[in-house]
Image: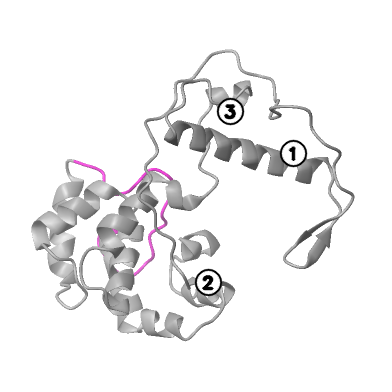
Amino acid sequence: MTRTRTSLREPSRRQRSPGAHAVDFSSGKKGATPKVVTFNGQKFHPNIILDTFFTFVAERHRIHQRRLYGQPQPWTKDSILATYPFTNVFRIYDRVTQYILHHVIEKGDQSLQEQCFRVMLFRSFNRMETWDLLTAQFGAVTWRDFDVNAYEAVLLAEQQEHPLYGHAYIIPSPKLGGRANASNHLRLVQLMMEEDLPGELKKLHHLKDAHGRISLFPGMGDFMALQ
């Protein structure tokens, strides 16, 4: 699987303007909607839902590009997109994803085992500050030197003063006998590595198969398995 990398970083969040209610993605006169479109060899008959979705996606990405190129506001004529924050169309541009690429994947041992360990550990908490804490305490974060009790002590002490988990989505805690959510998440990562999940994933050729294998672990529902 090819991993796309980029160093483009999105500027700070745009300001909100009050009173947004209209939806107008168009920057000019729209052409007629085609009767049939083809994606990956499959034919679809567009309707207003499909047309609106792709129009929204295109305009949202244009906003992102205009900001990156330093164009002044407004970046869109649509009042809803100008007012409310929406995720980037491409996940690669998200702030946390950029952090994972540059600070988790690219730094440290580049073997498959160690890269997978770092990604699984980071995604268990999905918070940059938590990763910074671990690297400050342990230096290079590696499966080779991983001590679940030492990591647990650091995280539970930090939890008394600061949050450990990101706020983008809820990360369910598996029931693995730990005394806290962080304890169980550390044990889940340990379980995945002890069962050689990286080696198993390397043998697979399709994302759906990898997703299915990860889903078999405790706490790994459809959403978290994709993460």
Residue 51 visible somewhere in the drawing: yes
In the rendered structure, the answer to whether residue 200 lies left or right of residue 105 reads: right
In the rendered structure, the answer to whether residue 188 lies left or right of residue 109 reads: right
| Res 8 → quadrant | top left
Is label 2 in a helix, a strand or a loop? helix
Mark number displayed over residue 52? 1
Instruction: Tell me what residue is drawn at x 51 percent, y 75 percent.
Output: 210
| Res 218 → quadrant | bottom left
Is label 1 in a helix, a strand or a loop? helix
What residue type is disc 1 on?
A: Thr
Instruction: Tell me what residue is drawn at x 70 percent, y 42 percent.
Output: 53
In percent of width and height, residue 224 lies at: 47, 61
| Magenta part of the chain | 162-182
Is label 3 in a helix, a strand or a loop? helix
Compared with 15, 67 (above or below) is below
What is the CA distance from the residue labelled 2 to the residue labelled 3?
Answer: 32 Å
In the rendered structure, the answer to whether residue 130 lies left or right of residue 93 reads: left
Instruction: Tell me what residue is drawn at x 37 percent, y 42 percent.
Output: 9
Mark number displayed over residue 211? 2
Along the polypeptide, which appears first: circle 3 or circle 1? Answer: 1
Compared with 69, 201 (above or below) is below
The residue that disc 3 covers is 81
